[in-house]
Structure formats: C-alpha cells, structure tokens
Amino acid sequence: MGLKFVAPSIVNGDRIAKLDKVEIEKQSECWMNALVVYVVGQNPTLNSITQYINAHWVCSDEPVIFKHDEGFFIVRHKSREERDKVLYTRPHLFYGKPIIIKHWSANFNFHDEILKVVPIWTKFPNLPLSCWGEDSLSRIASLLGVPLYDDECTSKGLRVSYDRVLIEIDVTQEIPREVAVEDPNGKRFQQKVLFDWLPPFCKKCQMVGHNCNKATMVGPKITQKWVPKREEAGPVAGGDVEGMEITSGHLENEVITPVATPAGFQGQVDEDGGAWKIVTRKTKDKGKGIQS
C-alpha cells in the first residue's frame, strides 16, 4: 500500500489531519461483523482463546481472531448473522472466567468502553403481559442503560414468567434492583430486576474483575499450642527408676518426641511443662542411659 504526502490543515495555529469520510466508512465496513472479547480476571493467549472459540462457538465459517495489546481480542466474523448468534446468546465462560462480548463500532474505545459499559442479560420477572411490547420494553430497559435486543422466547411469547433483554449497562454506576413503571392510566408499580451476571467493578482501580473495597471473609486464626503430657515410666535396664517422669507433648495432631534437659541446665524451668530432667528409655543396648 503506497502512501503519499497530504498537506495538513491549519486550525487556530494547530496542524490537524482531517480524515476523509468515504475512506473511514470503507475501513469501518471491514470490521462491522467483528466482536470485541474480554476475559474478566485473566489474560489468555491467542492460541488458548482460538481453541476455546472453535470448541464452544458454533460458527459456519471460522472467524479471524486478533489479540490487542491491552488484553482484548477482536473476533471478525464473515456475516452479521454469525456475529449476532454469538453476541445474543447466554453469558459465556472461559474455563470459569466470565467473558464480556461487545460488537465493534467505528468510535469504539478499548480502554473506556470495555471496562465500563458492559452488555448484560437482564430479566424483568412477573412483568404484566401488556408491557411486553417493543416500545414498552425499550422504555423500561432504558432506565438501566441502552437496550439492544430481547431474546427469542420474549419476542415470540414462548415464556410468560419473565422477559429477558440485553442491555448495555454502565457498571461504574449504582445499578438498581427495582425500577418504577407507570401505565397510561397513571398507575405506578415497582418492577423487580434480575441479572444473569454482573461483573465486579473496582472503583479504586477503575477496572472490571475485582473489588479492592469488598470485605474479604477471613477464617479464625489457627495457632499451635504446646500441650504437656506426663506419664509414668516402667523399669528400665540399669536400675529401678519408678516414678521418673517423662516429659512429652504434642502440637495439634503431631506427636513430639520426649525432650530432656542437657547436662548443666539443672533448675531451669519450662513455662508450660515444668522442670527439665534427664530421662532414660529402653534401647537395644541394655544398661545404657541415653540423654535426649
């Protein structure tokens, strides 16, 4: 592709490159069937995400996959039908990690949009059947964000317990669990809102995937405590030592071998087990005292 010099425009003393509208639209058309994919809490390789897409996404034609330096992927399909088939299905998981999927647009900004405005499947349980029209659902869903589509069961009336709408929601803002709806007669009611999945958002880091301010449940601290144990020793070779104490103990379930005071430390006291003493035990070499 050969390039050429194009004189820049001067606006208020600044040199500006004004782009051609036809050229921009031509290049944008090449990416209109593309999806932007981001795995929350993980940065998979291009090879691993390719294997996942080929195994879990049912596509008639194999898409072309590109990896962005920021950890995003662009998956370009050959048709809009293939793109929408992936975009408007249930939430996807990459080996247990949630996946954010958005359609590419000409003014798409990777850092700002993918980490803040997320398409989320939203349910309106027990919504009156008279409110299931396209305009009514659009008005109700707009209280949460930008509505995109409803699912097949909602549009065809195959399910009456709840309707389900895909809405682009700004996860940096407080997300309501109820919305207020008013019918043409002025009667108002509170409509409950459920989400298939909500990504965690850290207000401190301004990133999706974790929450620094969320309290972490910490279990009770386990400490090891020395438990002294005393038992009577029977006769041993070399003399009758009935009544001699053997000091031993255990640390939780681990058995501690007997311990005795070395020579020269007479009178030193252990805070838990009392005075240290020299002990003997039976060995193969009868008659020999063993210092521990």
Image (cartoon, rainbow, N blue to C red):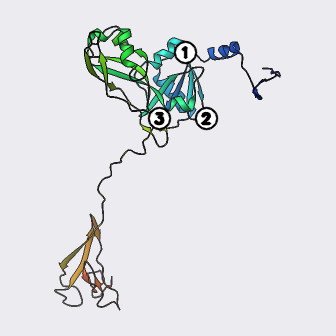
Q: Which mark is residue 111?
A: none
Disc 1 designates what residue?
61
Question: How far is mark 2 from mark 3, CA to CA?
Answer: 15 Å
Q: Is residue 262 left or right of residue 187?
A: right
Mark 3 residue crowding within 10 angstroms, few (<14) / some (14–19) / many (20+): many
Side of 26 where 250 appears, left or right: left
> Viewer-nearest of labels 3 and 1?
3
Disc 1 or 2, which lies upstream in sequence?
Answer: 1
**x%, y% of residue 167?**
42, 21
Residue 83 visible to an observer of this rendering? yes
Q: What residue type is labelled 3?
A: Val
Q: Is the C-beta separation of discs 3 and 1 under 8 Å?
A: no
Query: Which secondary structure, mark 3?
Result: loop
In the rendered view, would you say 20 is above or below 266? Answer: above
Residue at left 20%, top 86%?
Answer: 244
Residue for point 35% across, 11% down: 136
Q: Dividing the image into 4 quarters, which one contains the C terminus?
A: bottom left
Q: Nearer the viewer, mark 1 or mark 2?
A: 2
- Tell me the CA gap for discs 1 and 2: 26 Å
In this view of the protein, which residue sits in the foreground, 119 or 204? 204
Answer with left or right where residue 27 lies relative to residue 261: right
Say which of 190 and 108 sits in front.
Answer: 190
Residue 271, x across and y down, in percent: 27, 80
Q: Distance between the residues labelled 3 and 1?
A: 26 Å
Q: Is residue 94 visible?
A: no
| Mark 2: few/some/many CA within 10 Å (<14, 14-19, 20+) | few
* Label disc, if present, on residue 69 of the rendered structure: 2
Tell me residue 200's x, y (percent): 41, 36
Q: Return the residue at label 3.
A: 40
Q: Which amino acid does label 1 sit on?
A: Asp
Q: Nearer the viewer, residue 12 or 55?
A: 12
